[in-house]
Amino acid sequence: MSEIKIQMKNISKVFETEDMETHALKDVNLTIYKGDYVSISGPSGCGKSTLLSLLGLLDMPTSGEYMIEGMDVANLSLDEAAKIRNSKIGFVFQSFNLIDQISVFDNVALPLRYKKDKLSNAEIEQRVNKCLEMVSMTHRAQHKPNQLSGGQQQRIAIARALVAEPAILFVDEATGNLDSSTGDQIMDVLEQLNQNGTTICMVTHESRYADRATTQFRLLDGEILTLPNPPAAKEEPGIEQVAIQA
Ligand SMILES: Nc1ncnc2c1ncn2[C@@H]1O[C@H](COP(=O)(O)OP(=O)(O)OP(=O)(O)O)[C@@H](O)[C@H]1O
């Protein structure tokens, strides 16, 4: 059995405002193994952003258990959450969030320069170059982000997310700002990274991208369903086989 990277058990999230409670997530059970390529999809308002915020330690659940690499992370202070986020989690967003005033190289190096355990310049250079190579952007290291195309900027954002060697890469609608052929190329990059060992969990509303993942979860009204893997789904076309994950 493969190593467990992420495990959520009975995770719920309730938002309370003065006059109402919204049960955004209801008893979510989710396990992500080392090397998985996971997609989470579902209609607007089903809880995707809420789930990704909890997975990425940007917010805490109302109840339930959450473990990252065996560490209990369900009830952390903001400071503790930030520390674990910096060391264990890589994020890629729809907007690339790069800094135009500094070079591509320095953008990718930023997470390493903020690390508590300082790395030498030689180590930083080696890690940044390795990540730029992984996204085929070595030749643009000295450019500024605003001199690059949208797809190239997203590749740089992916390199930056990987440079601290996170346990898992969370990807939030990474193709949302890109035309469809550039979006397809970004999906190819993610697939290639996964084939080389990166564990990926991607949130997308595009079913053609969700279908490319090896494990597919679907959120409906705050509840998570596991879709059968693609070959099983093809055997019985037209029947939406969904089983609640054990
Ligand atoms: N801070 C909040 N306070 C109150 N309700 C919230 C809050 N954030 C989200 N919700 C509610 O929780 C539910 C899930 O929202 P969420 O943003 O996670 O959905 P989503 O699947 O990401 O939607 P979309 O695809 O439209 O971005 C919705 O009913 C939403 O109104």
Image: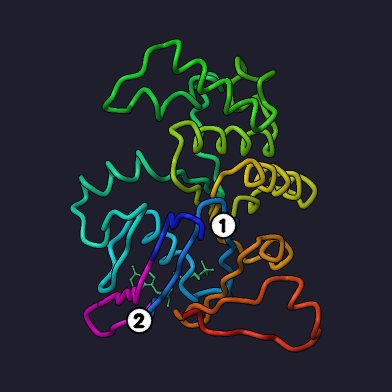
Q: Is residue 20 magenta?
A: yes
Task: Give whichever of 68, 43 is nearer the camera.
Answer: 68
Quarter location, residue 130: top right
Q: Disc 2 marks which residue?
A: 23
The disc labelled 1 sits on which kind of residue?
A: Met
Q: Is residue 142 left or right of residue 68?
A: right
**Rendered view: 40 above or below 177:** below
Task: Give whichever of 144, 117 is nearer the camera.
Answer: 117
Quarter location, residue 185: top right
Task: Give whichever of 122, 145 is nearer the camera.
Answer: 122
The residue at the point 64 percent across, 49 percent down is: 177
Q: Disc 1 marks which residue?
A: 202
Q: Is residue 124 magenta?
A: no
Q: Is residue 7 left or right of residue 178?
A: left
Which comes sooner in the sequence, label 2 or label 1?
Answer: 2
Tell me: is circle 1 under 8 Å from ligand 1.
no
Q: Position of residue 77 (x, y in %)?
A: 18, 53
The residue at the point 41 percent across, 76 percent down is: 28
Q: CA distance from mark 2 to mark 1?
A: 22 Å
The disc labelled 2 sits on which kind of residue?
A: His
Q: Which residues are magenta?
A: 8-24
Q: Position of residue 31 (x, y in %)?
A: 46, 66
Residue lying farthest bottom? Answer: 239
